[in-house]
Image (cartoon, rainbow, N blue to C red):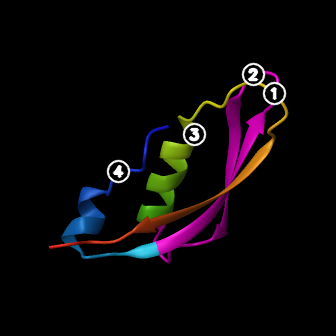
Amino acid sequence: MPRPTYPVEARAQHITGRGVYDVYINPPTGVVTRVTVVQSTGSKILDDAAANAFRRWRAQPGKLSRLRVPCNFWLTR
């Protein structure tokens, strides 16, 4: 599953944060149908980057309908 990419604009502004997201999955298809922010990173830029990455995820079809996902955006030297 693709990881969120650090947005260039957030990196340039040294924006960091930790968010938590609920990823809703259609069990018969494994397709992500919705992403909601449970705890914001404090930055719309980072929250949007996380949600966009999670929307590209695909799960194995089955019984999984929701997944709570933490996501950290940290800058290192």
Mark 2 → mark 3, Cα distance in angstroms: 14 Å
Residue tagged 1 = 62
> Over which residues does the magenta segment extend?
18-44
**Where in the figure is residue 28, as x and y percent of width and height?**
82, 22
Residue 29 magenta-highlighted: yes
Residue tagged 3 = 55
First in sequence: mark 4 vs mark 3 = 4
Label 3 amino acid?
Arg
Label 2 amino acid?
Thr
Label 4 amino acid?
Thr
Q: Residues within 10 Å of mark 4 (few under 14, many from 20)?
A: few
- Residue, x 81% and y 30% (percent of image)? 27
Residue tagged 2 = 29
**Where in the figure is residue 25, as x and y percent of width and height?**
74, 37
First in sequence: mark 4 vs mark 2 = 4
Q: Residues within 10 Å of mark 1 (few under 14, many from 20)?
A: few
Residue closer to the observer: 64 or 8: 64
Residue tagged 4 = 5
